[in-house]
Image: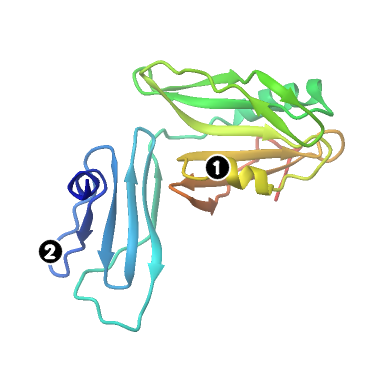
Amino acid sequence: MDAILQEQFPTVMVPRYGDFVPLAHNGRRFLSASDGLWLEEKNQWLHILWPLALQNQVAMPYGSLQKKVDFLYGEFPVDMITRFMVEAKERFPLECAAWFTWDTYLKRFNYYSLHARQASLDNLDYACPVLPETECLVCDIHSHGRHPAVFSPEDNNDDRGETKIAVVLGRINSSPSIAFRLCVAGLKIPIKYNLAKLPFLEET
């Protein structure tokens, strides 16, 4: 079992004198660097290098790394946020959700409105769509009704272990606000986007 885990999620030493070779295929691995333990993950739309546990007390005989977040799809589909805003207003004061997926064959985003099994003023239970083999989830967006755009403890639990961009849209009925974060293997990394095309939104 240990051998299987090591094959699926290897730990690799970062070369001190040679060149570091990033992942060439989709997968996840851990990297021992001069300043501690790092995570590297690559999939159809993302390549990330991110520190997990940094330290400077013990001299480690490895090379160094720099943080990297590379979105391989190009430009984020801001127009889909506008589309979701319309849906959120229609369903207000109840919460609602949608997925933005990346089609690896057609190289484009697709939009999925999610069916709510149960929706209330502060809770949402929805059915996840079954995606074609050529599509993968990139963005999971949901509304918070009249509440501000802040990730709740329930959001934190839902996002645990997933790799996706999580977005919450709040204050639908007054001064709409929005918050983004990148979720990777339990990490929750705040990210910013150029919202010039969405002047009606305040980023939190």
Precedes in sequence: disc 2 or disc 1: 2
* Amino acid type, mark 2: Gly
For the N terminus, the image quarter is: top left
Which mark identifies residue 18? 2
Please name the residue shown 32% across and 73% down the image. Answer: 35
Q: Residue furthest left?
A: 18
Q: Could you tell me residue 131's position as x and y percent?
A: 45, 18
Residue 82, relative to residue 70: is it above or below? above
> Can the viewer see residue 9?
yes
Q: Nearer the viewer, residue 4 or 180?
A: 4
SS at mark 2? Answer: loop
Local crowd size for mark 1, using a 10 Å CA cut-off: few (<14), some (14–19), many (≥20): many
As drawn, 133 above or below 12: above
Residue at horizontal 53 percent and vertical 33 percent from the top: 139
Label 2 and label 1: CA atoms lie apart by 37 Å
Mark 2 nearby-residue class (10 Å; few <14, some 14–19, many ≥20): few
State which mark lies toward you, 2 or 1: 1
Taking 120 as reference, is 150 left or right?
Answer: left
Q: Secondary structure at mark 1?
A: helix
Return the mark for residue 159.
Answer: 1
Residue drawn at the location 59% of the way across and 21% of the way down? 127
As shown in the figure, which amino acid type bears the numbered disc 1? Asp
Q: Quadrant of residue 194?
A: top right
Give x and y (percent) for residue 175: 83, 41
